[in-house]
Image (tube, rainbow, N blue to C red):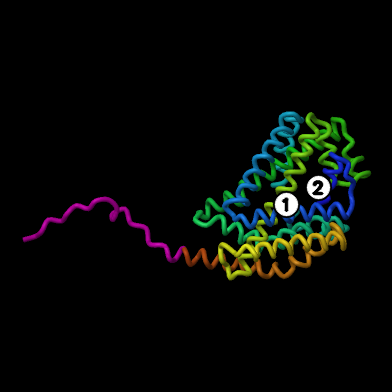
């Protein structure tokens, strides 16, 4: 909501404040409830597909208009650094240094995704019915990870090039106006600023809507004994509660309140996720045991008839 508010203020000078942020939450809540009520195969799928297309167009625009060679070099080097540091950073606990950054970023995002895991996992399972495990891994892990690498490389690489070799001013904009304005300060350095900034705001809104409507549907499923098509009233109720929770957290503590609530909500699900991992492994073993034995080479193909012995 902070990014939305900053973007609208950047384009049209509407100002920033709690009241405007609450209005944005209310409007987006109505939109994602309408999307959730329409069903997975209609509003949710349409918004998700549209979001991917628009995001791809924005990335392609920056990759072509921006520092293309620098972005390609950044992608290669950053991917290598990521793969080489993945194991080391996964076990970092800041035992010999200040853990403030680790707590506000790494641990917060671990907790953030753990708190999202229950209904995101159910929603992915809901839309992946009929897929093989190979298709599931490719569609849920590999492709999204690749898209994430591209997104951060193009956006981050363009910003780094601006600060190191270009117009700069992004750090100053963050220090004076907040981190949310950095994206729009970057887009201001390229052609069609008004259009690309509006597209960025639209993307953030659709990302929020598509995530929130999935949450409403899944919570409706979980509170309706697992039915794949929960009643519309249940979906509306959960959507309204989600929007109200966002408003309360914003008023009570802003981003800090959201971080605290995410970590608190994630703690119980750590135990649940360990149980889910064990259950998944058991189910896979059971499925392997239930598979029919493969036919031997001698049993395949047409068989010659054995002549009768008189």
Q: Label 1: state its secondary structure.
A: helix
- Determine contact: label 1, label 2, CB under 8 Å: yes
Asked if the magenta segment contains residue 85, the reply would be no
> How many numbered marks have been drawn onto this rendered protein structure?
2
On screen, residue 75 above or below 128: above
Residue at 69% of width from left, 47% of height from top? 83
As drawn, the label of residue 46 is: none
Observer able to see residue 99: no
User: What residue is at 78 percent from the left and 64 percent from the top?
Assistant: 263
Left or right: residue 219 versus residue 156 is left
The picture quadrant where one finds residue 77 is top right
Q: Which residue is mark 2?
A: 4
Task: Reply above or below: 187 against 133.
Answer: above
What residue is rendered at 83% in x and 50% in y?
Answer: 2
Would you say 154 lies left or right of 136 here? right
Residue furthest right as drawn? 176
Asked where in the image residue 175 lies, by quadrant, the reply is top right
Percent x, y of residue 163: 86, 35
Q: What kind of element bears circle 2?
A: helix
Q: CA distance from mark 1 to mark 2?
A: 10 Å
Image location (x, y in percent) of residue 164: 85, 33
The crowd level at tag 2 (other Cα within 10 Å; few <14, some 14-19, many 20+) is many
Residue situated in front as seen by the camera: 159 or 120: 120
Point out the image quarter for the C terminus.
bottom left
Residue appearing at x 74%, y 68% in the figure: 267
Where is residue 209 shown, x and y percent of the image? 70, 52
| Dominant SS type (magenta) | loop
* Label placed on residue 208: 1
Q: How far across and down, in percent of the image, does residue 65 sit?
A: 74, 29
Region of the chain picked out in magenta, as a range: 288-310
Residue 148 makes an appearance in the image: yes
């Amino acid at each position: 909501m902070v990014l939305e508010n900053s973007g609208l203020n950047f384009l049209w000078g509407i100002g920033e404040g709690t009241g405007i942020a609450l209005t944005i939450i209310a409007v987006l809540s109505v939109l994602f409830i309408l999307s959730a009520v329409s069903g997975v195969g209609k509003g949710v799928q349409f918004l998700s597909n549209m979001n991917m297309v628009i995001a791809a167009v924005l990335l392609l625009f920056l990759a072509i208009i921006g520092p293309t060679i620098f972005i390609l070099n950044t992608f290669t080097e950053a991917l290598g650094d990521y793969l080489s540091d993945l194991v080391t950073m996964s076990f970092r606990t800041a035992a010999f240094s200040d853990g403030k950054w680790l707590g506000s970023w790494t641990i917060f995002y671990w907790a953030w995704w753990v708190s999202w895991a229950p209904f995101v996992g159910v929603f992915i399972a809901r839309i992946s019915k009929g897929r093989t495990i190979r298709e599931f891994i490719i569609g849920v892990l590999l492709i999204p990870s690749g898209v994430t690498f591209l997104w951060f490389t193009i956006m981050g690489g363009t910003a780094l090039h601006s600060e190191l070799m270009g117009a700069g001013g992004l750090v100053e904009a963050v220090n004076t106006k907040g981190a949310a304005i950095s994206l729009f300060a970057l887009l201001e350095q390229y052609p069609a600023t008004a259009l690309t900034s509006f597209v960025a705001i639209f993307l953030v809104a659709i990302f929020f809507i598509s995530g929130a409507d999935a949450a409403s549907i899944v919570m409706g499923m979980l509170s309706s004994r697992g039915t794949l098509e929960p009643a519309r009233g249940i979906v509306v109720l959960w959507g309204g509660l989600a929007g109200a929770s966002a408003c309360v957290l914003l008023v009570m503590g802003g981003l800090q309140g959201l971080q605290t609530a995410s970590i608190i909500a994630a703690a119980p699900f750590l135990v649940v996720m360990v149980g889910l991992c064990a259950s998944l492994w058991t189910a896979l073993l059971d499925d392997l045991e239930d598979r029919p034995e493969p036919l031997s080479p001698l049993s395949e193909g047409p068989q010659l008839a054995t002549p009768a012995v008189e």
